[in-house]
Image (spheres, helix red, strand yellow):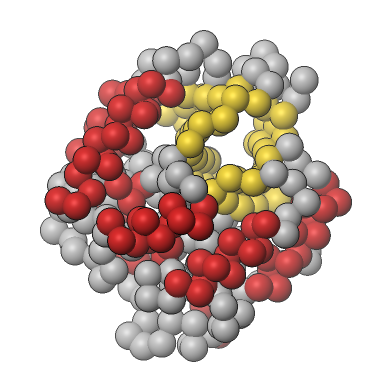
Amino acid sequence: MTIRIWQVSDTHLSEDRAFFQGNWDAFAALVAAGRPDLVVHSGDLALEGPERPGDLDRGLASLRGLASEWLAIPGNHDIGDNHAPGHAPKRPVSAPLLAGWHARFGACRWRRDIGAWRILGLNAQLMADEPPADLAAEAEAQWAFLDESLATDRPVLMFVHKPLFETVPDAPSEPALRYVPPRSVSRLFGAIGGGAVRIVASGHVHQHRRLSHAGMEFVWAPATAFILPDRLQAPVGEKDLGFVAFDLHADGSFDVSVEVPESFAANDITEFPAAYPKPAPAASDAG
């Protein structure tokens, strides 16, 4: 039995700044036609959730309108960003912001067994090298949840908003806020290196690429909403708009394809100055 999972990411939906709603509507039409077994939204559902809770409400309504079952994990534009060494985020994650996610979407981490596979979602915004005091217990609870979730004979497809690294885990990655912070990456690899995790799927960068490392496939999903031009964000992958389709087979093998629908508008963030009024988001904060 083959399980079909579609990953959509970085949709940046808004209550009253609906610049990118058209690409979401096009995606929803594809879901209605293709009927994947599960849709996973890998974060940045909202245009600017921390300052504008109505953007999260719009995102929730949009997910509820899908013709397939869905699950979601938060991104930095949903609940604020985590701290990275030497970099303080403009919108830090906090317990009240996380509570707003929980009230709307349920748990920010989850696991689901479908067919032969385990599907796992984690909250990258809790993966700070030094979590804020009001989230320290929540962050430790997620690490315990990860260890518990990987105690399985099933192959695992793991979703996390931010990529773990740019090239290899121990190489420095810049800009720092683009990736999971280094100590958390080390801890993650200590947990996922046991062989159960076959795929780590992420979003956030608004570029898609695939990397293989330590027996795992690392898949970066393209954004659905917009790309950033090279002068704002250095290319490390392909700057298309689309989504990722995973076909997960009962024997533990899988197929991955990046879908770039013709029905998606080729949005460039510089064409929408009202989306993020000046000062414009820095490249390191893209996603």
Instruction: Pinpoint residue 44: horizontal percent, then vertical percent.
Output: 48, 61
- Compared with 25, 256 (above or below) is above
Instruction: Using the image as rendered, state which of residue 195 and residue 14 is in the foreground.
Output: 14
Instruction: Using the image as rendered, state which of residue 56 and residue 1 is in the foreground.
Output: 56
At a point 75% along the width and 25% down the height, the residue shown is 2
Residue 40 seen in render: yes
**Residue 53's quadrant in the figure?**
bottom left
- Compared with 140, 284 (above or below) is below
Instruction: Pinpoint residue 77: horizontal percent, then vertical percent.
Output: 42, 65
- Compared with 122, 270 (above or below) is below
Instruction: Pinpoint residue 69: horizontal percent, then vertical percent.
Output: 69, 44
- Compared with 151, 180 (above or below) is below
At a point 62% along the width and 74% down the height, the residue shown is 20
In the picture provided, is 161 more to the left or to the right than 25? Answer: left
In the picture provided, is 183 more to the left or to the right than 27? Answer: left
Residue 189 seen in render: no
At a point 13% along the width and 58% down the height, the residue shown is 86
> Can you name the residue that lies furthest to the top here?
153
At a point 64% along the width and 64% down the height, the residue shown is 61
Instruction: Using the image as rendered, state which of residue 18 and residue 85 is in the foreground.
Output: 18
In the picture provided, is 27 more to the left or to the right than 276? Answer: right
